[in-house]
Amino acid sequence: MAAPRPSGARADARRQTIVEAALEVVRSHPVADVQLAEIAARAGMKPNHVLYYFASRDAVLIEAVRHAETALADARSRELRAAEEPLARYVEQYLPDDRHDPVWKLWLEGWLRSASHDEFGAVGREMNERWLSDLVAVLEGSVAAGEDKLAFARRFNVFLDGLAVHVLAGHIDIEEAREWAMRMLAVELGLPHA
């Protein structure tokens, strides 16, 4: 049985420091090359100190993606409701910032490992539901899709996932990915597109 992890404000602050350090390391390295020692060094700690707060390197990475996605999701609904062009803003928020986007790099790792690592799968399902919910809400205020809004949202997010993979691989740039996404929306929803 695993030892319980420390709790309280100080422990939460330490975990936050570790998670932010992990995101910085992932931005500059392939996920497979990210070592616990480097995360610890970036956080100003020793590796065994990181393991006091997290059970493993994977636990740190899972929490890093959960933390980043939760922060984004908490602001996303408000931003989308206030946006002049909410579908365009959704596309901007969904796609990676660039080829080194740490959250997207962690998503790819999580998808690959979710078949054998339940925690990766659980985080993925939870965050996917939040994205879908926000897109369905945006579609409520726009031209209705010819099919069920949730079915359309799922299909569109899968399309965005494919674009994101190509951005991360350097096959297309982020502006091209955004343009393709907006064209797809224009065709699918009958929206005007420049």
Image (tube, rainbow, N blue to C red):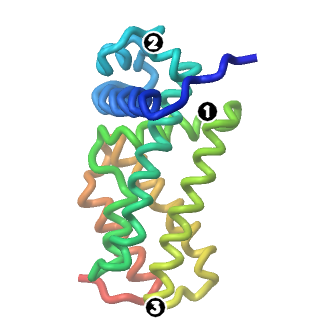
Q: Is residue 57 above or below residue 89?
A: above
Taking the spot 35% from the left edge, 77% from the top edge, the residue there is 86
Q: Pointer 2: what residue?
A: 49
- On the image, which quarter does residue 39 sit in? top left
Taking the spot 29% from the left edge, 68% from the top edge, the residue there is 179
Q: Pointer 1: what residue?
A: 113
Taking the spot 47% from the left edge, 54% from the top edge, the residue there is 161
State the separation of the CA atoms marked 1 and 3. 37 Å
Q: Which of label 3 and label 2 is nearer to you?
A: 2
Nearest the camera: 18 or 142? 18
Which structural element holds mark 3? loop
- On the image, which quarter does residue 143 sit in? bottom left
In primary-sequence order, the first of circles 3 and 2 is 2
Nearest the camera: 147 or 27? 27
Q: Is residue 127 above or below residue 143?
A: above
Which structural element holds mark 1? helix
Q: Position of residue 100 (x, y in %)?
A: 30, 38
In primary-sequence order, the first of circles 2 and 1 is 2
Would you say the residues marked 2 and 1 are in contact, meaning their CB atoms lie under 8 Å apart?
A: no
Label 1, residues with CA under 10 Å away: few <14, some 14-19, many ≥20: some
State the separation of the CA atoms marked 2 and 1. 26 Å
Q: Pointer 3: what residue?
A: 143
- Amino acid at pointer 1: Arg
Nearest the camera: 69 or 50? 50
